[in-house]
Amino acid sequence: MNNIYIIGVGLIGGSLALDMKSNNAQATLYGIDSNTTHLDEAIELKIIDEKATYDDLKDADLVVLAIPVDKAIAELPKVLDAISDTTLVIDVGSTKLPICNAVEHHEKRRNFLATHPIAGTEFSGPSAAIRDLFQKKTNIICEVEKTTFKLQEKALQLFSDLGMRIRYMNPEAHDKHIAYVSHLSHISSFMLGKTVIEKEKNERDIFDMAGSGFESTVRLAKSSPAMWTPIFKQNKTNVVETLDEYINNLKQFKALMEADDFEEIYNEMENTNHIKDILKGIV
């Protein structure tokens, strides 16, 4: 795949572009972005080779849609309208059911593969793009059977070259599970940051006491609200369910504190400690 078009040259789109260029010196990377400053920056950083428009997509071997999930729903049908019959289109969004539903009956649905690389940082924009971001990361693929087999093969080779592990999942299951392991984590981080910032208004030295534990826990609060608000909106039902469970656990912990039941608090933490065994070798 030599003619590669990246729609959205931020962290994920830019990192993909860097690695695909490294793996294929013959490839030409084209960028499409509503933010022209991002395109100029991406060229300066050698993330992409040239700017492009949707009119150019007829020549594409591969199109990567790496924009916020609300915009992806609107743009994916336009992309499929513009491509040739041999073009592979993938998206990288954190919600999968809405994007799959948006093109369920499109005549070029077979050209599209719904994916979610579980990779990223809290930073955004072209300058956030980094090489080898996807090494040993899991890539969720949904509704693979709806993509033509020849394009499936091309996609799997691409993901293998990028060093990703593949997991197949239906979009409903993806959105439910990702609410727990990603979306809830971001909400927790944002709300912890909010709590501390509100306290800091009255106690200016509180951040002098912040250690690595606080820094790692609140890191995700630096993530882009423009990206995460649409994710929460699209996955509202699952996110609310996870919040109910999380809030109930917090209330239970608070009740144990109020009852001076520190033996049970110890047991709660010890029982949760085995998460390190679950995560070993995964993250």
Image (spheres, rainbow, N blue to C red):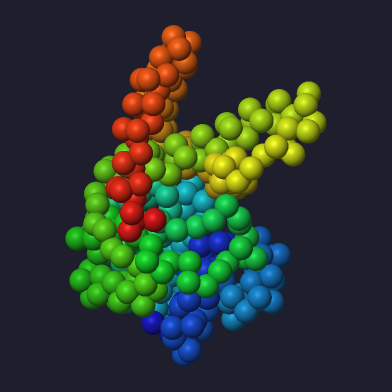
Q: Quadrant of residue 160?
A: bottom left
**Quadrant holding the N terminus:** bottom left
Q: Nearer the viewer, residue 248 or 235?
A: 248
Q: Whole-percent x and y of residue 37?
A: 71, 65
Q: Whole-percent x and y of residue 274?
A: 31, 41
From the viewer's perspective, is residue 159 above or below residue 78?
below
The residue drawn where x is 29% and y is 51% is 104
In the image, 64: left or right of 108? right
Q: Residue furthest front?
A: 263
From the viewer's perspective, is residue 210 above or below residue 120?
above
Query: Does residue 133 appear in the picture of this structure?
Result: yes
Query: Does residue 107 appear in the picture of this structure?
Result: no
In the image, 106: left or right of 57? left
The residue drawn where x is 34% and y is 50% is 279
Q: Whole-percent x and y of residue 264?
A: 36, 20
Q: Residue furthest bottom?
A: 26
Q: Nearer the viewer, residue 23 or 278?
A: 278
Q: Whole-percent x and y of residue 266?
A: 39, 26
Q: Residue furthest top?
A: 259
Q: Nearer the viewer, residue 197 or 210?
A: 210
The residue drawn where x is 23% and y is 60% is 144
**Quadrant holding the C terminus:** bottom left
In the image, 275: left or right of 260? left
From the viewer's perspective, is residue 206 above or below residue 96?
above
Q: Nearer the viewer, residue 151 or 198?
A: 198
In the image, 157: left or right of 190? left
The residue drawn where x is 28% and y is 42% is 172
Q: Quadrant of residue 135?
A: bottom left
